[in-house]
Image (cartoon, helix red, strand yellow):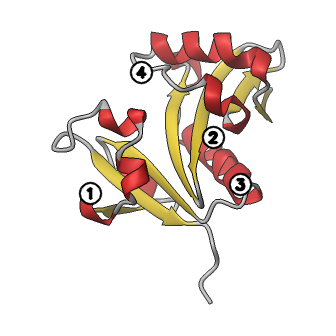
């Protein structure tokens, strides 16, 4: 059985190792550790994780990783839904993410957005700065219900 939980500071080393093994940067994880969601087995083995960096009312979803033994579109969507709920609870109004493959994120209401429409504070983040903007799409989703 799998369950979701919000990460604690003591989870930082294992999340950083998990993310690094997937070929992603672990830079900045310590600073936003309480905004990470962990998917774990009933034996407390990490099966997936995703984080959120806060920039005012905006959040940057990062480090979305699933263990190869648990890799499925359904679990990916459940993990993303979990971090989006957590973001809403923290008062985040817009969520952004970086990706090379956009299709699955449309399922959750994300749309592609041009770099010039992304808040400058997000574009200046270390997480976004490490990617070539011509090789990556930025997607966003409003977390505030339309009036």
- Residue 142, percent from left and from top: 54, 68
For label 4, the crowd category at 10 Å Cα-Cα, with few meaning under 14, some 14 to 19 and many 20 or more, is some
Q: Is label 2 in a helix, a strand or a loop?
A: helix
Say which label, 1 or 3, has the lower sequence index: 3
Residue at numbered disc 4:
24
Q: Residue 79 got which mark?
A: 2
Residue at numbered disc 1:
115
Q: How far apart are marks 1 and 2 (CA)?
A: 25 Å
As drawn, is 108 to the left or to the right of 121? Answer: right
Say which label, 4 or 3, has the lower sequence index: 4
Say which label, 2 or 4, has the lower sequence index: 4
Residue at left 74%, top 54%? Answer: 90
Q: Distance between the residues labelled 2 and 3?
A: 10 Å
Q: Is label 1 in a helix, a strand or a loop?
A: helix
Q: How far apart are marks 4 and 1 (CA)?
A: 21 Å
The residue lying toward the viewer, choosing from 84 and 45, is: 84
């Amino acid at each position: 059985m799998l369950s979701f939980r919000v990460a604690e500071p003591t989870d930082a080393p294992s999340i950083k190792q998990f993310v690094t093994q997937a070929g992603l940067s672990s830079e900045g994880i310590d600073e936003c550790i309480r905004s990470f969601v962990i998917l774990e087995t009933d034996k407390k083995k990490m099966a997936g994780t995703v984080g959120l960096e806060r920039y005012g009312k905006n959040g940057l979803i990062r480090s979305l990783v699933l263990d190869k033994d648990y890799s499925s579109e359904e679990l990916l969507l459940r993990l993303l839904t979990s971090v989006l709920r957590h973001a809403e609870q923290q008062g985040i109004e817009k969520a952004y993410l970086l990706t090379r493959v956009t299709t699955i994120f449309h399922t959750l209401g994300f749309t592609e957005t041009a770099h010039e429409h992304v808040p400058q504070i997000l574009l200046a983040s270390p997480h976004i700065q490490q990617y070539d903007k011509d090789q990556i799409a930025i997607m966003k989703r409003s977390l505030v219900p339309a009036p």
